[in-house]
Amino acid sequence: MTVVVDWVQAHLGFLPPQMLVVIVSMLPLIELRGGIPLARLLMLPLSQAILFSAIGNIIPIPFILLFINKIFDWLRPTKAFGWLVEKLERRALSKSEGIQKAEFWGLALFVGIPLPGTGGWTGSLAASLLKIDIKKASLAILLGIAIASTIMSLISYGVFAM
């Protein structure tokens, strides 16, 4: 992990550490599962780690919930991006069985349990594809982000601190 911190500081060291945590937490697949440990390695206090990683994780969510279906509809017929849309849809829907069964709580737990392939990005994509009400999806995703923040904080700053 120090290799990552060294790379980040060498290439993005001109940014304040809080901004680095926001940027990393905005990235798909990494999200706050990477943001909170990065904050710990950058020696930010826990309160800042949670705040800035949650902000970064939340920023893409409304855009995904509101626009991803329209973007996919626009890209699907193209040769350049049609295959990618199909792949993303298959991936999100293959992970959505639990979300479909227990809609709100399924989505909250899917986002909240910090495992590869879960999180706000995939949860938002699945909620959009499953046409879950945007208010219900937003609340479930926010709850999931709170759960993931708690788990990652315990791992990074608490019980299993590095």
Image (spheres, rainbow, N blue to C red):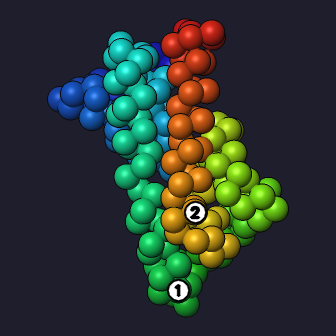
Find residue 99 and report its image quarter.
bottom right
Residue type at the position of mark 2: Lys
Gap between marks 1 and 2, in whole Å? Answer: 23 Å
Identify which residue, 11 or 33, lies in the foreground: 33
In front of the other: label 1 or label 2?
Answer: 2
For residue 51, side relative to residue 96 (left or right): left
Residue position for label 1: 73
Element on which disc 2 rests:
helix
Residue type at the position of mark 1: Asp
Q: Is residue 33 above or below residue 92?
A: above
Q: Residues within 10 Å of mark 1 (few under 14, many from 20)?
A: few
Looking at the picture, how far across and down is residue 21, in whole percent?
A: 36, 32
Numbered-mark total: 2
Q: Is residue 4 visible to us here?
A: no
Looking at the picture, how far across and down is residue 118, in whole percent?
A: 65, 47
Looking at the picture, how far across and down is residue 111, in whole percent?
A: 62, 47
For residue 103, side relative to residue 59 (left or right): right
Identify which residue, 104 or 161, lies in the foreground: 104
Image mark for residue 136: 2
Identify which residue, 86 or 45, lies in the foreground: 45
Q: Is residue 23 above or below residue 16?
A: below
Residue sitting at x 54%, y 17%: 156
Find residue 23 and report its image quarter.
top left
Residue sitting at x 44%, y 75%: 67
